[in-house]
Image (tube, rainbow, N blue to C red):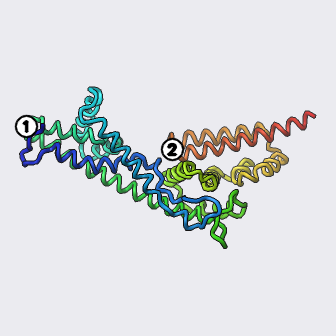
């Protein structure tokens, strides 16, 4: 049992109640890249407007699952867990304002119900009133920081979803508003133009992958196809430097790669030059983009597709020459 604080408020009750709302929102923050607040309920031959339909029930289930997992762990936990929580709390207490913001951001996923209750327990167990107040003040500051981070993230998700809806919508038939899958070259060209005019950041790429996962779960193969084309358009935009023959291939839709390879090979772009150029591009993606980022993943996968297609074409050319 916890005794009342000097202000007549049981800190454990305060922390437990706060954890109910804050940990729920942190769970949403944690799964922002996995949940699909997506609007894709239908893929091919569906009116464009239906792309905007939400899947809030799916997100709610994930939120409930996160809360159940947090509650099941309990405030005590294993000795190692308690030690880790205490180490984090000590660092938070010792940090200045700037350091606190950084620590909370780096450890946001650690702020589950157990951690809040641990802070309350330490406040209650403290011998000096100043120490008790310091723990409660820390909890308040952390809550405000996390709330601000969650709100910023949720706002970013909403903005990314809205921008993504607009890009996906241009792939629909202009007259009927329906999607025809596989996409026509005209639809891909419209999507490419929309991507070139859009600010595609990590949050939007995160949202694209969330839509893909949700569409795959719902067996909406047509929407998965559209979103994969969207990622290809983005990668082509980022990787096309316009400086070497390889850019002729990279900047073109995948359906045109065989013809583009034929053209650059006839122009003297041999397999060795292709391999060296591609290797430099891949090194640039690995070294210049944040490790593990969606941007790095999308561009690396795109280059791998170009490599696989190119190797196949060069092998065919080599085999034909040998004959």
**Few, some or many C-alpha atoms within 10 Å of disc 1 (few <14, some 14-19, many ≥20)?**
few
- Report the residue that reaches farthest toward the bottom: 175
Q: Which residue is mark 1?
A: 128
Residue 28 to residue 122: above or below = below
Q: Is residue 272 left or right of residue 187?
A: right
Q: Is the N terminus in the top left, top right, bottom left or bottom right quadrant?
A: top left
Q: Earlier in the sequence, mark 2 or mark 1?
A: 1
Q: Quadrant of residue 127?
A: top left
Q: Position of residue 105 (x, y in %)?
A: 34, 45
Is 292 in front, or is 96?
A: 292
Residue 104 to residue 220: above or below = above
Residue in the image at 48% along x and 53% along y: 36
- Report the residue that reaches farthest toward the right: 323
C-alpha gap between disc 2 and disc 1 = 46 Å
Q: Secondary structure at mark 2?
A: loop
Q: Is the C terminus in the top left, top right, bottom left or bottom right quadrant?
A: top right
Which circle marks residue 1 in the picture?
none
Which circle marks residue 293 in the picture?
2
**Few, some or many C-alpha atoms within 10 Å of disc 2 (few <14, some 14-19, many ≥20)?**
few
Residue in the image at 30% along x and 53% along y: 147
Q: Quadrant of residue 165?
A: bottom right
Residue in the image at 11% along x and 35% along y: 126
Q: Is residue 323 left or right of residue 42?
A: right
Q: Is residue 224 left or right of residue 30?
A: right
Q: Position of residue 265 (x, y in %)?
A: 82, 45
Q: Quadrant of residue 48?
A: bottom right
């Amino acid at each position: 049992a916890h005794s009342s604080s000097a202000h007549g408020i049981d800190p454990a009750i305060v922390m437990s109640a706060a954890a109910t709302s804050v940990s729920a929102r942190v769970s949403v923050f944690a799964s922002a890249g996995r949940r699909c607040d997506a609007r894709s309920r239908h893929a091919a031959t569906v009116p464009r407007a239906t792309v905007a339909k939400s899947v809030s029930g799916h997100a709610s289930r994930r939120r409930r699952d996160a809360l159940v997992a947090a509650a099941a762990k309990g405030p005590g936990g294993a000795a190692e867990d308690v030690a880790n929580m205490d180490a984090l709390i000590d660092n938070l207490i010792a940090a200045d304002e700037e350091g606190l913001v950084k620590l909370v951001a780096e450890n946001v996923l650690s702020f589950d119900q157990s951690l809040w209750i641990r802070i309350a327990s330490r406040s209650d167990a403290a011998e000096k009133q100043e120490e008790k107040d310091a723990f409660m003040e820390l909890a308040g500051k952390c809550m405000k920081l996390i709330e601000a981070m969650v709100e910023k993230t949720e706002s970013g998700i909403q903005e990314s979803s809205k921008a993504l809806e607009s890009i996906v919508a241009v792939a629909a038939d202009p007259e009927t508003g329906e999607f025809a899958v596989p996409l026509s070259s005209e639809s891909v060209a419209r999507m490419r133009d929309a991507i070139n005019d859009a600010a595609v950041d990590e949050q939007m790429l995160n949202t694209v992958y969330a839509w893909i996962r949700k569409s795959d779960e719902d067996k909406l193969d047509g929407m998965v196809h559209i979103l994969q084309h969207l990622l290809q358009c983005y990668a082509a935009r980022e990787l096309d430097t316009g400086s070497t023959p390889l850019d002729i291939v990279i900047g073109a839709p995948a359906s045109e790669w065989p013809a583009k390879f034929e053209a650059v090979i006839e122009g003297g772009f041999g397999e060795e030059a292709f391999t060296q150029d591609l290797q430099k591009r891949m090194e640039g993606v690995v070294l210049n983009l944040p490790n593990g980022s969606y941007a790095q993943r999308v561009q690396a996968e795109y280059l791998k597709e170009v490599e696989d297609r190119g190797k196949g074409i060069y092998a065919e050319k080599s085999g034909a020459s040998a004959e």
